[in-house]
């Protein structure tokens, strides 16, 4: 999960009372639909799959990037390079956060030079994770373009960063917690929101 925010889960078509676990705003079907829409948007913006590379930001950005790559491959009939970009040592809040072990960076064969790189993350919040990802990416080459795809944009930006592709815009209070759960890491898919004013 992105360090900017935490996340939990339920379908946008369901209305559950808020409880200690939070209320679900996206369920598995909602997440699947959002990712298929994002995949279409990526292909439309890029005019096809040529020259595309998807890089997930650990931890939950990585399975999201893999799902997007699989969906694009389903649409286009060709494999899309997908990898992971760890940003731990590029964050500007290391001295304020508990020490975290870096996670693997996996740049696909062929690199990123001259490619259209789509960074993928679960939640866009302050924008600081994305800024760190741009710094990390610069150490691996010079893409032709960099775009950002996120499952949830919860607002409260601290930097002038905007996502190109968003699954769900989710207005939140800063006191609320958004939690994303994905089957690859959490055994189920969901986005939930908890905390804030009751």
Image (cartoon, rainbow, N blue to C red):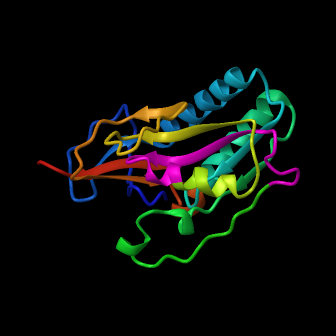
Residue farthest to the left, as pictured: 198
Q: Residue 157 lies in what quarter of the image?
A: top left
Q: Which residues are magenta?
A: 108-131
On the image, the x and y values in percent for residue 58 come to 58, 60
Query: In the image, is 166 to the left or to the right of 46?
Result: left
Say how many tags the image has.
0
> Does 60 appear in magenta?
no
Query: In the image, is 18 to the left or to the right of 24?
Result: left
On the image, the x and y values in percent for residue 177 come to 30, 54
**Residue 30 higher or lower than 1, as above or below:** above
Q: Quick one: 18 or 46, which is closer to the camera? A: 46
Query: In the image, is 92 to the left or to the right of 113?
Result: left
On the image, the x and y values in percent for residue 125 come to 39, 46
User: Which residue appears at 79% of the width and 47% of the height?
Assistant: 112
User: Which residue appears at 42% of the width and 38% of the height?
Assistant: 160
> Does 124 appear in magenta?
yes
**Residue 70 higher or lower than 98, as above or below:** above
On the image, the x and y values in percent for residue 134 come to 59, 50
Q: Quick one: 109 or 189, which is closer to the camera? A: 109
Q: Quick one: 64 or 56, which is closer to the camera? A: 56
User: Which residue appears at 50% of the width and 41% of the height?
Assistant: 151
**Residue 80 higher or lower than 49, as above or below:** below
**Residue 24 higher or lower than 51, as above or below:** below
User: Which residue appears at 49% of the width and 63% of the height?
Assistant: 91
């Amino acid at each position: 999960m992105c360090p900017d925010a935490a996340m939990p889960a339920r379908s946008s078509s369901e209305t559950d009372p808020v409880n200690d676990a939070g209320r679900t705003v996206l369920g598995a079907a909602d997440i699947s639909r959002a990712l298929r829409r994002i995949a279409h948007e990526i292909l439309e913006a890029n005019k096809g799959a040529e020259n595309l590379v998807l890089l997930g930001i650990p931890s939950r950005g990585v399975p999201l990037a893999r799902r997007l790559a699989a969906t694009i491959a389903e649409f286009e009939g060709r494999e899309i390079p997908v990898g992971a970009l760890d940003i731990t040592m590029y964050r500007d809040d290391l001295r304020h956060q508990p020490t975290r072990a870096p996670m693997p960076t996996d740049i696909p064969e062929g690199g990123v030079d001259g490619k259209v790189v789509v960074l993928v993350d679960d939640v866009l919040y302050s924008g600081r994770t994305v800024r760190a990802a741009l710094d990390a990416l610069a150490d691996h080459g010079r893409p032709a373009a960099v775009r950002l795809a996120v499952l949830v944009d919860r607002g409260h930006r601290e930097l002038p960063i905007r996502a190109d592709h968003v699954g769900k815009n989710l207005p939140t209070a800063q006191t609320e917690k958004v939690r994303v759960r994905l089957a690859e890491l959490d055994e189920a898919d969901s986005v939930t929101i908890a905390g804030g004013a009751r």
